[in-house]
Image: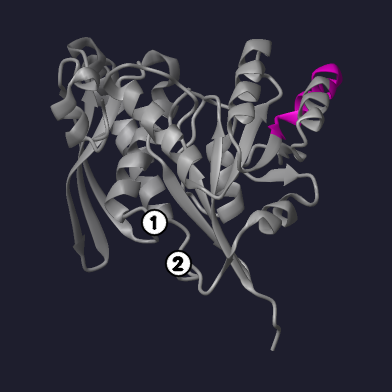
Amino acid sequence: MSDQKLKAGYIGVVGLPNVGKSTLVNHLTRAKVCITSNKPQTTRKNIMGVMTKDKSQFVFVDSPGFIQAEAGLNSFLESEWRKVIDDVDTLIFVISMDSKKESFERTLEMIDTVSKNKIALLTKTDLNLPEREIIVEHALRDRGIPLFKSKRKGKSESLDITPGFLDALEESLPEVEAFYYDSEIYTTQSLRELSSEIVLENVFRFLNNELPYETGVQIIDFKEEPNIYKIYAEIIVSRERYKKIIVGKGGESIKRIGTLSRKSLESEFGMKVFLDLRVKCKEGWNKNNKNLKELGYAEVR
């Protein structure tokens, strides 16, 4: 029997909005742990994805993009990414090749303020911007931060990451007496929480730029019955006119969103799903503490 010690740790995945943090966690866990879309700040809560190898367990914590705010939903997002930076053992700073100079400089400022294990991942390297890539390499080398690179494999969420990435992460993990989670677990989210995230993902993916960021999903009821999950959910908007966008002409949009969401849920759960999806307007919900708490965004100042 090997004398190799067990290693396990929490690894925060941080960076600016829309740089590929959620895609990275999904790739590493080989599961649909985090929702993704082209809309910035799709991730609103810290979400854990777990990957277990023979002697190591990686607990990845996906976080909202760096944002600062005094109140409302955005202040919750800020509290979430700050919590990740404070609580994890190692940080992966995700940097996108298409980030603007100001965005990259902001990420460097965040890197400079953190005194714990740090690794950087440069995403979207298939964009082929060699001069920008050299700038990133020099900046991180000067800081002694290991840099790895990734690009998409075709149109899938699978990534091609330069060799040594997982080895570097494993090296940073502390030794433990036992793993934190059962080896079969890939996320700490409940089925109810996953359902809310998956419906929100499909809302954003279907309507994209037509719909404002101030949209949420609340699971009203989740029933586990023999051979079927019955899910009753509400899509929450902050203005009455946004409700019309989601419902669509003759209810076509909400029907399509419902179909897409149901198929995604069935694929994720491996179970037949009945989904009852409604749209409800709560004026200014994203700035109202009571409404924020109802949707699970409790930690607001």
CA neighbours of label 1 inside 10 A, class few (<14), some (14 to 19), many (20+): some
Instruction: Between residue 163 and residue 220, name the one nearer to us.
Output: 163
The Cα–Cα distance between marks 2 and 1, rounded to whole angstroms, is 9 Å
> Which residue corresponds to mark 1?
188
Q: What stretch is highlighted in magenta?
A: 122-134
- Residue 54 shows in the view: no
Task: Please give the name of the residue rendered at 66% of the width and 13% of the height, measured from the top-left corner.
Answer: 100
Answer left or right for 197 relative to 105: left
Secondary structure under the numbered disc 1 in the rendered image: loop
Instruction: Between residue 282 and residue 144, name the one nearer to us.
Output: 144
Task: Please give the name of the residue rendered at 37% of the width and 41% of the height, measured from the top-left corner.
Answer: 198
> Which residue corresponds to mark 2?
181
Seen as rendered, the residue at the extreme bottom is 1
> Mark 1 is on which residue type?
Thr
Among the two numbered marks 2 and 1 on one chain, the one whose residue lies closer to the N terminus: 2
Q: Which colour scheme is used?
A: one colour
Task: Please give the name of the residue rendered at 49% of the width and 53% of the height, measured from the top-left corner.
Answer: 49
Task: Please give the name of the residue rendered at 30% of the width and 24% of the height, measured from the top-left corner.
Answer: 73
x then y, percent, for residue 14: 55, 35
> Mark 2 is on which residue type?
Tyr
**Residue 85 forms part of the magenta stretch:** no
Residue 132 image-quadrant placement: top right
